[in-house]
Amino acid sequence: MTRARAVACSNIALAKYWGKASVAENLPATPSLSLTLAGLRTITEVEVDPSLSCDHAELDGAVLTGRPLERVAAMLDRLRARAGVSTSARVVSRNHFPTAAGLASSASGFAALALAGARAFGLDLPLETLSDIARASSASAARSLFGGFVALPAGGRCAERVASGEHFPLSMVVTLTAKGAKAIGSTQGMQHTAATSPYYAPWVSHSPKLFDEVRRGVLERDFERLGVAMEQSALMMHASMLAASPAVIYLTPTTLAVMAAVRELRAAGTPAFYTMDAGPHVKVLTLPEHAARVAACVEAVPGVERTVVTGSGPDAALTDEDPRSGE
Ligand code: DP6
């Protein structure tokens, strides 16, 4: 086969990955556990084309150049090496959510690219192997090959499913607090934190405890336990960044206002907990029956652009969907 299309959903880490055990191999220093989200999807087509002299890639209609193109080509190189071929490829990808704004679009992007690229180069690989290939490009992408609740161990090469989404149905109210791309990418942000923050080592050594709590919360369907540990994981990760020199600050006044609104909701009896990644947006985890109320509450916070309410998504899969067609 010379052309293949794949769809992968993004994921939000409930227990965070922040820091690398090996920079050369891109192995995570902390164990992470995520929820794959149906509402944040990437569709990617890879076409192997012998007439091309180098790889060509397009994301949301814009031609990639520089570092983003190099990252795509590096993954294609790994796939070519496995397949024993040297042909260049044309990649067309579409994100069905805002790109590079801290919504982990690289996660679904590299997961979809791993699957579509493997097929296009004639490889039929299991999800575990594709997860390993995706991890080398972006560690959070390793988790997006699997649906539901997914773990990537510290030092781990591939992610593993912890539980299906049906095991514990949850809603994520993705709250967009700003327009546009983030200032510092997560790779750079975590490297800088590791190099300069005195709070980095305590974060790495404490993260397995938070991971275990999140995992137990999921397995035992204990929302309170899950939520408390999830918030602490996010805040401890951000604390490590705030203590870097100079500080890495992704949180804005609107981020803090949404966090306060969630705490107020909780104090008034609505189960809801927040988490933030390498960006200003807030993802609020709640039970499905409370999602509409949580969304209405955070949308009323000044500065909030909009919300996307979504639940657990499936494994990455081959698709007929054309990334050139819009929403
Ligand atoms: C804050 O996976 O983007 O979203 O491996 O360097 O590409 P690289 O980093 P990336 O980092 C994601 C960090 C995070 C937390 C998480 O998703 O676990």
Image (cartoon, rainbow, N blue to C red):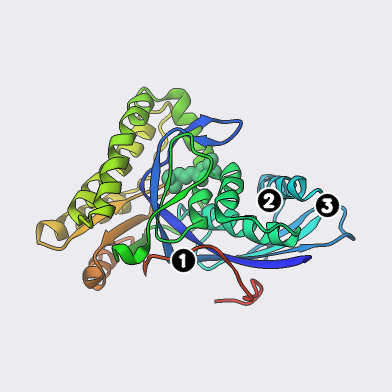
Residue 105: image location, x then y, percent: 52, 56
Mark 3 or mark 2, earlier in chain: 3
Q: Earlier in the sequence, mark 2 or mark 1?
A: 2
- Can you say whether 189 is above or below 226 in the image? above
Name which quarter of the figure residue 198 lies in: top left
> What residue did someone put label 3 on?
54
In the image, which is nearer the foreground, mark 2 or mark 1? 1
Q: Amino acid at mark 3?
A: Cys
Residue at left offset 33%, top offset 35% = 208
Instruction: Give the residue displayed 25% in from the left and 44% down from the top.
Output: 229
The kind of secondary structure element at disc 1 is: loop
| Point 57% across, 45% down: residue | 132
Q: Circle 3 — which element?
A: loop
Measured Cα–Cα span from mark 2 to mark 1: 23 Å
Residue 249 relative to residue 49: left or right: left
Numbered label attached to residue 72: 2
Using the image, determine if residue 322 lies above or below residue 107: below
User: Residue 103: horizontal and vertical position, in percent?
Assistant: 45, 56
Alpha carbon distance from label 3 to label 1: 33 Å
Mark 3 or 1: in front is 1
Q: Circle 3: is it few (<14), some (14-19), or many (20+) Cα within 10 Å? A: few
In the figure, is residue 302 to the left or right of 56? left
Image point (53%, 35%), residue name: 27
Q: Amino acid at mark 1?
A: Pro
Q: Which quadrant holds the C terminus? A: bottom right
Q: Are marks 2 and 1 in contact (CB under 8 Å)?
A: no
**Quarter occupied by residue 291:** bottom left
Give the Cα distance between marks 3 and 2.
12 Å
Which residue was labeled with disc 1?
A: 314
Q: Indicate if the residue with disc 1 has its beta carbon within 8 Å of ligand 1.
A: no
Residue 155 point in image, percent of width and height:
48, 34
Q: Is residue 140 left or right of residue 125?
A: left
